[in-house]
């Protein structure tokens, strides 16, 4: 089969087409109206580029047969379900910890504002940091799994540690394919000949030869998720006739994420500064995104806002739910 490359807009179009087809199958009718979520800023401090990015998204959506297209800010979408419960105006901090980024927004919510079509003025500030769930997986892997493959061990002469770069690549989802080539394997075989812990490096070579890198990252992610509900988990991963085995504790995860949590806290402080408010003025802390379930993250967030009401949404679906509610209001039959 001849390989083919796809541009980003093509991939986006394929995804949108699938969503449309599944929605129409579920509803038993055609769908030509949609509300799309968008970040507050596609591009920071550049309104022209920001508008161009939304136009690109709108073009990709329209190309799949949608005729009526509207947009809603993702932090507003995340707050819409909660907003149905409030009886007066409140200041909410929306914490959205995704796979690759963490985004924070200070938003005014109220029963009256929920009915407004333009909510841009209700977003008092936003900020984000490129820290997310895939970073947490990488950090946990580097701390607990990569040492089982030789990370941190010495060469036979005891003069230096083994190179870190291949372990970093193997722990990082989008870098794993860099190891799947002849030169990378030659380099690793050279490392193996020099290593004190040669058997560990040979296991890494077998793992890469069998192209198990992404499966390994998935297993680390599963272990991280288990640590949301328990204090200790046993990690086990098969490589040919061997198994990588190690225990992982909630303390291991907390230590691995310490720097990331500090970066998240600093970005929250910047979000509040941009809004011109203190932490004590936040009435509601709305958590969305799967990484908010990591105990090291959740505990620190709650500690920052002890007086705020804690609102845990459907962590994986709250933005989608809010967009559906907005679409029903904008395109549905009159109430």
Image: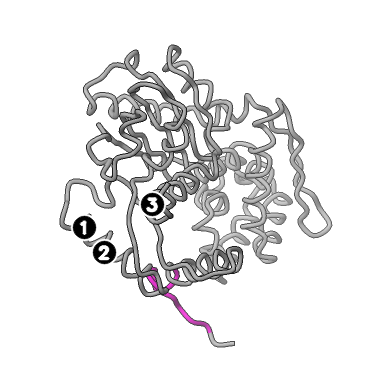
Q: Which residues are magenta?
A: 3-11
What residue is drawn where x is 28% and y is 40%?
Answer: 119
Distance, label 1 to label 3, CA atoms, is: 14 Å
Dividing the image into 4 quarters, which one contains the N terminus? bottom right
Q: Which mark is residue 37?
A: 3
What residue is drawn where x is 27% and y is 60%?
Answer: 53
Structural crowding at the residue carrying mark 3, measured as other residues with C-alpha within 10 Å and reported as few (<14), some (14–19) or many (≥20):
some
Q: Is residue 57 left or right of residue 173?
A: left
- Asked whether residue 304 is drawn in magenta, I would say no
**CB within 8 Å, label 2 to label 1:** yes
Q: Marks 1 and 3: which is nearer the front?
A: 3
In the image, 195 versus 265, the foreground residue is: 265
Quick one: label 3 or label 2, which is nearer the N terminus?
Answer: 3
Q: Is residue 177 left or right of residue 52?
A: right
Distance, label 3 to label 2, CA atoms, is: 13 Å
How far from the left and from the top, in percent, is residue 209? 67, 66
Helix, strand or loop under label 2: helix
Q: What residue would you read off at disc 1?
A: 51
Q: What residue would you read off at disc 2?
A: 55
How far from the left and from the top, in percent, is residue 137? 57, 43
């Amino acid at each position: 089969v001849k390989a083919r490359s796809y541009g980003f807009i093509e991939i986006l179009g394929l995804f949108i087409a699938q969503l449309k087809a599944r929605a129409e199958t579920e509803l038993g009718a055609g769908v030509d109206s949609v509300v799309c979520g968008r970040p507050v800023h596609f591009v920071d401090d550049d309104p022209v580029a920001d508008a161009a990015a939304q136009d690109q998204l709108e073009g990709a959506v329209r190309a799949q047969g949608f005729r009526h297209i509207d947009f809603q800010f993702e932090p507003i979408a995340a707050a819409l379900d909660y907003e149905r419960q409030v009886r007066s105006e409140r200041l909410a901090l929306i914490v959205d910890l995704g796979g690759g980024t963490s985004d924070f927004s200070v938003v005014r919510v109220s029963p009256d504002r929920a009915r407004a079509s333009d909510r841009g003025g209700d977003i008092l500030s936003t900020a984000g940091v490129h820290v997310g769930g895939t970073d947490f997986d990488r950090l946990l892997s580097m701390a607990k799994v990569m040492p089982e493959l030789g990370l941190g061990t010495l060469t036979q002469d005891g003069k230096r540690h083994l190179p870190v770069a291949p372990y970093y690549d193997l722990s990082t989802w989008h870098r794993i394919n860099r190891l799947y080539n002849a030169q990378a394997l030659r380099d690793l075989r050279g490392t193996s000949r020099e290593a004190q812990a040669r058997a560990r490096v040979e296991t890494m070579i077998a793992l890469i030869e069998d192209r198990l890198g992404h499966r390994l990252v998935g297993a680390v992610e599963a272990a991280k998720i288990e640590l949301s509900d328990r204090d200790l988990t046993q990690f086990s991963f098969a490589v040919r006739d061997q198994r990588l085995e190690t225990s992982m504790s909630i303390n291991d995860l907390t230590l691995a994420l310490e720097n990331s949590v500090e970066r998240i806290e600093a970005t929250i402080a910047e979000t509040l500064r941009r809004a011109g408010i203190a932490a004590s003025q936040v009435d509601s802390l709305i958590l969305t995104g799967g990484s908010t379930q990591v105990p090291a993250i959740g505990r620190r967030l709650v500690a920052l806002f002890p007086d705020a009401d804690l609102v845990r949404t459907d962590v994986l679906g709250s933005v989608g739910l809010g967009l559906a509610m907005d679409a029903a209001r904008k395109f549905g039959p009159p109430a």
